[in-house]
Image: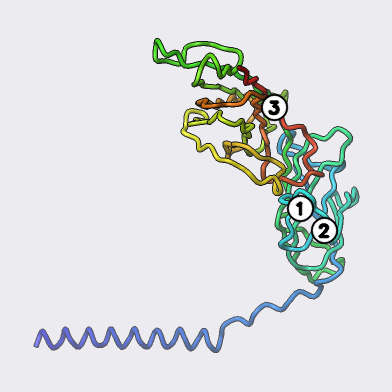
Amino acid sequence: MPEEIKVSKTTLAVIALILLLIGVFYYQYYYAAPPAAPPKYTTGLTVKFKIYDAATYALITSNVAPTFYSTGVDPLGTRTFTTKPVAVAAYDSTLGAWSVPLDAGSYVILIKDTAGSKTLYAETYTVTVSGTDSEDKEVWLEPSTLNVYSRATLTIASSILAYNDTSGAYDISVSNINITAYTKWIVTYSFTISDSDTSKIIKAGRLYLTKITGLTPTSASLDGATAAVNEDTDASDDGMTGYYIPFDTDWEVGEIHRLDIYFEAAGASTGTLTLKAFEYYECLNTNLRWWSDQTSTISVVS
């Protein structure tokens, strides 16, 4: 008898669960809230947004051009960019925000510095414009505030140690790479990021090195971590060729970064070994790269 009672209770529990599930389904099917009505206005909207300078902690109201393009357009990634914009925003002091006429949908916005003395990197964002029921047809861009970043000052210094066959160490300080006197060297580059405004940055990019016949970089480390030495043979995409080491994070004011590269010579040619800090590699558009990439040169002599 106790076993039968137990079975009976289990069965009742299962039946109750089934009835509950049927009730939930019935309620959702017959009583679920109807979908929200589409917005009344989706075209001819006045779209508002703000631009924030992350270095000065202030809103920007002038000296930039916020330009809108269709989704999928990349104003930064092509050296020669000719696509026409959908619209260009202007600052509206009455609204206290940037304003642009757009229809609902998704866009790419480019914010570029137009000041006589430029300080801001160009930025792009994918943004959304939603419809509205408001009679004034004003909406806020999503996101409503877009950040821009100021460029810091980058200084490069270098030093060279040649390999000492007697001591078995890189302990001979030299001022150039003499391919007759030595066969191996370690070149150390230091990158100092400075500015009176500590919130400025150097955007991530690549450290390019001239390729000299017979002079081979065998290994490298950046900030103490092993770094791959890659080779770029196609200048059509970025205008650069040679060996390169990526730096994948933005460098901030107050930081000093170090690159160590080991070189070996075998039938090497003379020339000039140039390191170029090709910052902000994401931006290849020549019209937006307003700064001069910093370089450091070392003579290769015999």
Residue bearing the label numbered 1: 75
Q: What is the residue that sits farthest to the front in this orientation? A: 267
Q: CA distance from mark 3 to mark 2?
A: 32 Å
Q: Are marks 2 and 1 in contact (CB under 8 Å)?
A: yes
Nearer-the-camera pick, 109 or 141: 109
Q: Alpha-carbon neighbours of circle 1 within 10 Å: few (<14), some, or many (≥20)?
A: many
Residue bearing the label numbered 3: 295
Asked if residue 7 is positioned above or below residue 254 in the image, the reply reads below
Q: Secondary structure at mark 3?
A: strand
Residue bearing the label numbered 2: 83
Residue at x 44%, y 87% (from the top left corner): 23
Q: CA distance from mark 1 to mark 3?
A: 26 Å
Asked if residue 45 is positioned above or below residue 296 in the image, the reply reads below
Residue 205, image x and y in percent? 64, 39
Asked if residue 91 is positioned above or below residue 221 in the image, the reply reads below
Q: Are marks 3 and 2 in contact (CB under 8 Å)?
A: no
240 sits to left or right of 245: right
Q: Secondary structure at mark 2?
A: loop
221 sits to left or right of 48: left
